Amino acid sequence: MVFKNTASLFRFMLRRDRLRMPLWLIGITFFTLIVPVAFTDLYPSQEERDGMAETMANPAMTAMVGPADLDNYTIGVMTAHQMLLLTAVVVGLMSILLVTRHTRADEEEGRLEMIRSLPVGRLSNLNATLLALCATYVILALITGFGLYALGIENMGLEGSLLYGTTLGVTGIFFAGVTALFAQLSESSRGTIGVSIAVLLVAYLVRAVGDVGNETLSWFSPLNWVTRTEVYANNQWEPLALMLGVAIVLGMLANYLNAIRDLEAGFFSARPGKKNASAFLQSPLGLAVKLQRTGMIAWAVGLFVMGVAYGSVLGDLEAFFEGNEMMEQMLVAGEGYTLTEQFIPTLMVVMALLATVPPVMAMLKLYGEEKKNRVEHLLGRAVSRTKLMGSYLIIAIVNGFVMLSLTAIGLWAAGDVVMEEGLDFGTIYGATLVYYPAVLVIIGLAAFFIGVLPKLSSIIWLYVLYSFIVLYFGELFDLPDWVGQLSPYGYIPELPVDDMEWAPVSILAIVAVILMTAGFIGYRRRDMEG
């Protein structure tokens, strides 16, 4: 029986994730429910909502959050337009992390071998994982859907609210299928997460480019199907049937591949290495680069393409600007800066936060290796803790600089081609690189946690998420300035609209150095895990 004791494993997984899954559900539901309440206070009249619709009617915003019925911009449509796609991306990320944890990661760390020594079927673990995720997303769909309806906001009816919640749930099931498939193809949990996140990013980029210029192209992205549900407008359920159908096919394919492969094997097998390692690879820095090389290249390509995607819409932005009285008034208010120049800081903070992810991953990799008992093999030789941590820190620092530079180059290269007057490279590069001290603070915080409070290292991701929320939605929700200034990104001058301020940038650089130094001291003194 290939499915024997699937139900027992299903209950076991729910028990293992008895804290993790509720935290995901509470976080997603909380941010979903507070948005329409905030919109009701901020835009009480239809006239104000129509004004917001005009500001959203440009290619840059369409690329970011997708299309919407801007002629009927009610609180419900506004909520779905500005929140549904971004929340779906978060749900997709949740699926990738949880499915990898219960499949390839358990296999990699030997847990699955122990489970298979018990009376369980060959496919039981994979299907118990998918069942646990499906049950979680059914709960997410119900509490989100009924929660939105319970707010009692006009134009947010029961059908639209349930469609909103179901869209999130089906998106989660879809990316659970994607990750289950790549867990069979890849040989490691790192590869599974990397490729699955790459699919998520490509889906977002294809939708962004397609929504702006080619609707046919957009339909190749599952995230386009999310926006085509037209929640609170026309309430289309058909795209969800398409997404669910593809998810079932992905799940069946993952089952087939799981049935025909050996334990710990993958269909994307690693190539045999060279017989003798180079002198660089024999150093801690060389080994760390080797371990992270594939992921760094993938992120570099992804961020460059994202820069190109955003840069490609800047030409249309200027065309939209011509003849739009409201936007022309904004130009005057912007003290002579073009709309494109005023949009650059908004784009830059989003791109800077995304560019923060790979260097933080590079830094946290050190603690990941420690948890897997691999660090002790290095420290048992003539390698000091300072040299080991310094190797990962150098990679993270260089990584952050390269990622920011690539986003700037991609944005400038595409924007310069599509805009009549072109873009000044120095302006774009300066507006991007000014965020580097904030990125260094996040890297320093990661080093501090690894050195002093290693078990709390994952908190750094909550801080990055907090920075994204308060800076992306800060003006939308009219949040006070101090909320944004709890994040290092809140102190960065918004170039080129603002003047350059060296004082806060210099202080951030000093804070980063202090955090890194504290991390080194803590790492030298504390006990190693394992």
Image: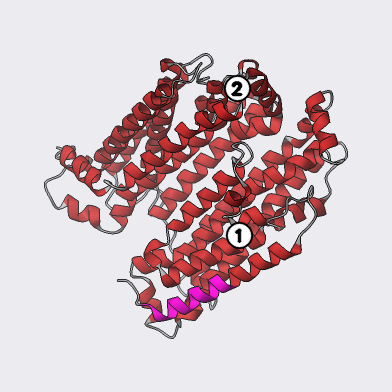
Q: Which residue is mark 1?
A: 439
Extreme residue in the bottom direction: 382
Q: Amino acid at mark 1?
A: Val
- Image quarter for residue 30? top left
User: How many numbered discs, if any?
Assistant: 2
> How much space separates mark 2 and mark 1, taking CA atoms?
34 Å
Q: Is residue 520 magenta?
A: yes
Residue picked out by circle 2: 68
Q: Residue at x 77, y 41 (%)?
A: 342
> Which portion, as a residue range, is magenta?
514-526
Where disc 2 sits, the SS reads: loop
Depth check, front residue: 488 or 97? 488
**Residue that appears at 53% across and 26% down:** 80
Which is more toward the observer, 498 or 108?
Answer: 498
Q: Is residue 28 left or right of residue 464?
A: left
Choose the circle earlier in sequence order: 2 or 1.
2
Q: In the rendered structure, which amino acid carries the disc numbered 2?
A: Ala
